[in-house]
Image (cartoon, rainbow, N blue to C red):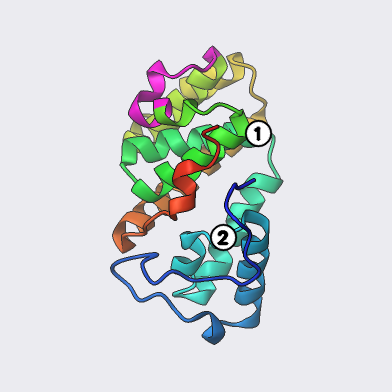
């Protein structure tokens, strides 16, 4: 997936976040070290969100367990999940998620331009009407949650989304609003590798 050379040993960047200390890998519980090692082997580098979330192991476990459920037990395509993440992160101005998940949009959509379009203004991005409806609802839930009504869900049904997919749209949106706010609160920084992934 990455053009960068794969490393066998995880490295927790001290600058993964600016407002809290990044723990030492050797001091982490075994299950966290194993998860970080697995992710490092898969990606070719250790995404800084793993280093940052390891600050509190119980939260690391809960965060990534829910993340895994969202991407593994879903009626949505992975590309659709990442479209939601980047559109939501764009309106929230979350630097970490814009960059990290922007890379995933480029990879899963096989489109080097789409992530930048979504961050700037998802309404003018090169996406179809069904996905625009999906992002309209996700952004509404992000910016004006009390305005979400049955008509928004009906619009998703009319766009072709199943009941399960509609639930998943809401769940992904809610989770990444949490993730955005925590990343901004801790001042998480994206790895340099994310900036270049999927651009060629």
Range covered by the magenta-colored residues: 117-129
Query: Percent from the top left, x then y, of residue 153?
Result: 53, 24
In the displayed structure, would residue 45 be above or below residue 115? below
Query: Percent from the top left, x then y, of residue 34?
Result: 67, 73
Label 1 sits on a secondary structure element that is loop
Asked whether residue 130 appears in the rendered view, the answer is yes
Position of 106 with respect to 120 (left or right) is: right
Query: Where, quadrant-wise, is the N terminus in this rendering?
Result: top right
Q: Which mark is residue 45?
A: 2
- The residue labelled by disc 1 is 76
User: Could you say which is closer to the camera, residue 128 or residue 21?
Assistant: 21
In the displayed structure, would residue 172 be above or below residue 110? below
In the displayed structure, would residue 188 be above or below residue 138? below
User: Could you say which is closer to the camera, residue 153 or residue 127?
Assistant: 127
Picture residue at 40% right of the left edge, 64% below the top = 16
User: Could you say which is closer to the camera, residue 123 or residue 109?
Assistant: 109
Magenta stretch holds residue 189:
no
| Quadrant assignment, res 73 | top right
Upstream in the sequence, badge 1 or badge 2?
2
Picture residue at 54% right of the left edge, 21% below the top = 131
Label 2 sits on a secondary structure element that is loop
Query: Where, quadrant-wise, is the C terminus in this rendering?
Result: top right
Count residues near mark 1 (Cα–Cα under 10 Å), then give few for <14, some for 14-19, many for 20+: some
Position of 143 with respect to 74 (left or right) is: left
> Do residues under tags 1 and 2 come within 8 Å of each other at their CB atoms?
no
Query: Percent from the top left, x then y, of residue 72?
Result: 70, 47
Picture residue at 48% right of the left edge, 81% below the top = 24
């Amino acid at each position: 997936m990455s053009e960068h050379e794969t490393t066998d040993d995880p490295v927790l960047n001290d600058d993964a976040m600016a407002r809290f200390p990044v723990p030492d890998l050797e001091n982490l519980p075994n299950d966290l070290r194993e998860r970080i090692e697995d992710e490092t082997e898969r990606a070719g580098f250790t995404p800084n969100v793993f280093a940052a979330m390891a600050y509190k192991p119980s939260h690391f476990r809960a965060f990534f367990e829910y993340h895994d459920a969202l991407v593994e037990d879903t009626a949505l395509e992975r590309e659709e999940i990442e479209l939601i993440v980047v559109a939501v992160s764009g309106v929230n101005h979350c630097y970490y998620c814009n960059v990290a998940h922007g890379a995933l949009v480029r990879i899963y959509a096989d489109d080097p331009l789409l992530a930048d379009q979504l961050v700037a203004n998802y309404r003018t991005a090169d996406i179809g009407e069904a996905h625009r409806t999906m992002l309209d609802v996700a952004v509404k839930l992000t910016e004006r949650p009390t305005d979400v009504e049955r008509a928004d869900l009906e619009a998703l049904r009319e766009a072709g989304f199943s009941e399960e997919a509609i639930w998943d749209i809401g769940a992904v949106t809610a989770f990444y609003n949490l993730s955005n706010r925590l990343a901004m609160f801790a001042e998480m920084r994206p790895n340099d590798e994310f900036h270049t992934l999927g651009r060629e």
